[in-house]
Amino acid sequence: VEDLRSNGLSVAGELRAVRLILTGDIAWMTSFCGHAGSSSRHPCLICTALGPRWAGDGPLVAFQCRGSPRTVEQSTDVRRALGTCVENADLPQPLTHDQHRSIQRRPLMFVPPEDIAPSPLHLTLGMTSDTLRLAAEVVRASAGPARATVFCTELGQLLLNRAGVEPAPYFGGTFEGRECHRIGRKLTLVCELLDEYAPARWAAPFRRACADWQALLPILNRSAVIAPHDMDEFERRAASFVDVTATPKMHILVCHATAFLRRFGSLGRYSEQALEALHGRFNQEAALYTAGTFLGSCGHFIKLAAMSRAPYSALYNNGPTRKTARAGARVATRPDDGRLRANKVQNGAPGKSTACKEKEADDVAKWSSNLAAAAARRIGAWENRGNRVRGVREQKVQLGRHVEPPK
């Protein structure tokens, strides 16, 4: 792969440049690049902005995009400084933060920061979970713990009955990608539920954030080329998230996703699911990429993929699709039509078995309980931090009163 990227690929006598786009979840990409991870002092792979808890250590604030772009030369300098060591901690005199900028391990390959995909799938998963947790935090902060527990319970039932989603225990008790898209389409119902529990001055900003996320979600995961006016709308909507709590995923969405979108024309075609699609294609056509070793087969596959240039949306449409209804077929358009699923359930038709219903109820109840506990921890941490800050200020005021004026 490094040879292809350095020397290019000859196609019909023409030398083509090969660009490697790094994609995957954030944990894997940080390990690939030798980065210390999302909890480090410089949590971003693309720029050197400081994390939220390090914001007071310098002029860089991660969520305001004040970090300078990373370069391949910085990773090269770290690798040269490490010598034969694997990690920075193994050096007799470890590098300082200003020297390594959270690149604390030997990188496997040098990838330009502008060629790192913003992980649309994991952005979708993380932002959806953060949005629901934010609603619980709003109720917890404005109405108290008892009302927050009731709200989380009703929210779980709303997502189950109206959005048709349930948390997956094998997925960490959270929602998968398809469920996140369904939740995104039903965020208006979440806002209406929040209006019943939180004051208008708390619920109105949440409603605006949900409207922005509903507009961002389709563009974030679409594998087709995005129109320029949609790119402008994406940039405007993404910038509106600066008033929400800063997280590494949100930093990528606000500060770097638009630049990648404008450069390559799409985010979804370079997502983690796109990597899985290429993996499936490699397995299906393994006989075409024979070599003496597995890595040789992978290299042969990458050469052919480079010859076909950038992927396109039709490449990922390789599964069975539902055919459109024939001309003149009756379509369930009336609200009381018996062919609608909701009406079938109301009329007594068994939609699911009793065991499935019990399992769904247990999973949703556990998710609601975990959501209420997470909101309580977050609000408790904010309250403790505020109390400490107020205590320090009061102590400074008292000390100032006892200081005698100079004679």
Image (tube, rainbow, N blue to C red):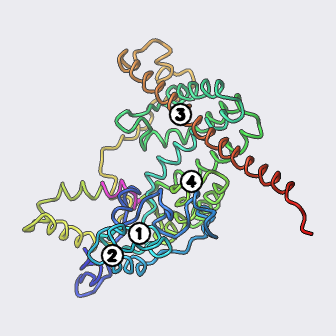
Q: Position of residue 224 (x, y in %)?
A: 44, 60
Q: CA distance from mark 4 to mark 1?
A: 31 Å
**Vertical position of residue 245 compared to residue 312: above or below:** above
Labelled disc at residue 103: 1
Q: Amino acid at mark 3?
A: Leu
Residue under circle 3?
A: 371
Q: What residue is shown at x 29% (from left), y 82% (from top)?
A: 6
SS for callout 1: loop
Instruction: Work out whether 259 lies above or below 216.
Output: below
* Residue bearing the label numbered 2: 82
Image quadrant in which the C terminus is located: bottom right
Tag in front: 3 or 1? 1
Q: Earlier in the sequence, mark 1 or mark 2?
A: 2
For the residue carrying disc 3, how many other residues have a C-alpha within 10 Å: few (<14), some (14-19), or many (20+)? many
| Residue 114 visible in image | no
Identify residue for label 4.
Answer: 216
Judged by depth in the image, the label closer to the viewer, 3 or 2, is 2
Q: Is residue 289 left or right of residue 12?
A: left
Q: Nearer the viewer, residue 304 or 111?
A: 111
Q: Nearer the viewer, mark 3 or mark 4?
A: 3
Q: Where is residue 13? Give x, y as percent.
A: 23, 87
Q: Which SS type dominates the magenta stretch?
A: helix
- Magenta stretch in the rendered image: 269-276
Amino acid carrying mark 2 in the image: Leu
